Amino acid sequence: MTKGLFITLEGPEGAGKTTIIDMLLTYYQEQEKQIIKTREPGGIPISEKIRSIILDPKHTEMDARTEALLYAAARRQHLVEKVIPALNNGSIILCDRFIDSSLAYQGYARGIDMDEIWEINQFAIGNVMPELTIYFDLDPRVGLARINNTTDREINRLDLEKIEFHELVQEGYYKVIEKFPDRIRKVDASKPLEQVFQDTIAIIDHYLK
Ligand SMILES: Nc1ncnc2c1ncn2[C@@H]1O[C@H](COP(=O)(O)OP(=O)(O)OP(=O)(O)O)[C@@H](O)[C@H]1O
Ligand SMILES: Cc1cn([C@H]2C[C@H](O)[C@@H](COP(=O)(O)O)O2)c(=O)[nH]c1=O
């Protein structure tokens, strides 16, 4: 039985998830909440190594199912080594991406049946799902323009996909939201950063009450 709270943040490239997670961490730490941030793929050494294989721009030959399995493998290790222990410890976990990314990117955008993506991920995660997911909604063109203007972020293999792929990712997320309307809350990520932050806090605070 877990005691903590598992929150995931989702959205297209450049939607602001990483920036907002850092702001949330500071905000809730000031309230002396027990909270950690992490990310997928990554968050622990094995999963960060898998991340570097998946996202290496040189690996253009990577098969879509191999990609899906690598994300699921990174997810499994991250869950076992970091997320579950933190939940058992009573922490709030803010995780940058989780299974919904696999459903939208590897499922809808790559064209693998979303049910198949769900099945391989069931093997990886068992019954551990986030209690709350915040989806940062943004036109993918705006998100890509943001990351192209960011000097300290490396451009990875997924960023380099055609705009049509990123449009499918957004459509895929809309399908995922239809599937999980109770868990996923949408935030308009095109607003100024401070407004996006306030909208996000309002959702989480409501949930914490
Ligand atoms: N609401 C916003 N308005 C304008 N710029 C923003 C906003 N939110 C974030 N940014 C800027 O957009 C860039 C990308 O933000 P960030 O890295 O947080 O996105 P992300 O969702 O984590 O992206 P990715 O998943 O592709 O890594 C950063 O330069 C950040 O400062
Ligand atoms: C978890 C997960 C991620 N992805 C994609 C989404 C992004 O393009 C990269 C991760 O980069 P970020 O800067 O940390 O957002 O990986 C995916 O396709 N499937 C997944 O399950």
Image (cartoon, rainbow, N blue to C red):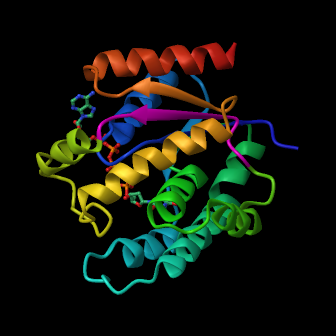
Which residues are the magenta region?
129-139
Q: Is residue 179 magenta?
A: no
Name the foreground residue: 107 vs 207: 107
Vertical arrangement, residue 74 with respect to residue 150, above or below? below
Vertical arrangement, residue 122 with respect to residue 176, above or below? below
Q: Is residue 38 left or right of residue 180?
A: left
Quarter of the image where one finds residue 126 = bottom right
Q: Is residue 157 left or right of residue 66?
A: left
Vertical arrangement, residue 164 with respect to residue 94, above or below? below
Ligand 2 sits in which quadrant? bottom left
Vertical arrangement, residue 202 with respect to residue 129, above or below? above
Residue 180 appears in the figure:
yes
Percent coordinates x, y for residue 127 in the rendering: 81, 53
Figure disc tally: 0
Quarter of the image where one finds residue 107 = bottom right
User: If the image is split into quadrants, where does the C terminus sit?
Assistant: top right
Quarter of the image where one finds residue 164 = bottom left
Percent coordinates x, y for residue 87 in the rendering: 72, 44
Name the foreground residue: 32 vs 98: 98
Residue 96 appears in the figure:
no
Name the residue rendered at 63%, 56% in the picture.
82
Percent coordinates x, y for residue 81 in the rendering: 66, 62
User: If the image is split into quadrants, where does the N terminus sit?
Assistant: top right
Q: Is residue 176 left or right of residue 141?
A: right
Percent coordinates x, y for residue 175 in the rendering: 56, 44
